[in-house]
Image (tube, helix red, strand yellow):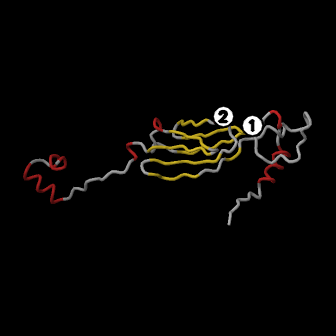
Amino acid sequence: MATFRFDPFSQLDHVARELFADTPANSRTPRFMPMDLVKKGESYELTTDLPGVDPKSIDVDIDNGVLTISAERTTTPEHTEGETDGVKWIANERFTGSYRRQVTVGDTVDTEAISADYRNGVLTVTLPFAEKAKSRKVTVNHAESIEAASDEGTADEAIEK
């Protein structure tokens, strides 16, 4: 059985934008972009759906530890609202406009190695861990090893061994 996600507030959001917007209804504010974020090996993987978006309109930027994804979905000229050349809209429910999402990644990500891939309407951004953020084993020194080392030399020499 298929599971369908229904957003009961999408129509209310549309009406509110129409009522309270200072600009015409066709110039919409950026839409929230739902995403999935997983830790996968030595990186994070962010996935978001951007169906119908021209890949050239997708921007992925990082600045001061904040990843910003923005994209634009436009209609083709023959599908603009109103009646032109015998085309009359019956329903216009698919979103056109801009998407925008920001995620704080801090200094845990190697910003020079971030990559993005857009396939079949899905954007995947890979955020490799920074070297200093990777897991590592820390050696625990204890009194016996330091005392034994003091017989052989300084405590600093024992720690280095």
**Residue lying at 66% horizontally and 34% vertically, measured from the top left:** 57
Front in this rendered view, residue 86 or 115: 86
Looking at marks 2 and 1 on the same chain, the residue that comes earlier in the sequence is marked by 2
Query: Badge 1, how many Cα within 10 Å: few under 14, some, many 20+?
Result: some
- Label 2's element? helix
The circle drawn on residue 74 is 1
Point out residue 9 in the picture as x, y percentages from the top left corner.
77, 56
Point out residue 33 in the picture as x, y percentages from the top left corner.
66, 47
Amino acid residing under circle 2: Ser
**Residue lying at 81% horizontally and 53% vertically, measured from the top left:** 11
The circle drawn on residue 116 is none
Amino acid residing under circle 1: Thr
Query: Badge 2, how many Cα within 10 Å: few under 14, some, many 20+?
Result: few
Front in this rendered view, residue 120 or 71: 120
**Residue lying at 7% horizontally and 53% vertically, measured from the top left:** 151
Point out residue 129 in the picture as x, y percentages from the top left corner.
43, 45
| Tag count | 2
Front in this rendered view, residue 125 or 22: 125
Instruction: Work out which quarter of the rendered image holds the N terminus and state it.
Output: bottom right
Furthest residue toward bottom? 1
How far apart are the alpha carbons under marks 2 and 1?
A: 10 Å
- Label 1's element? loop
Would you identify the image quadrant in which residue 121 lies? top right
Say if mark 2 contacts mark 1, CB within 8 Å: yes
Point out residue 29 in the picture as x, y percentages from the top left corner.
74, 41
**Residue lying at 68% horizontally and 45% vertically, measured from the top left:** 51
Disc 2 designates what residue? 57
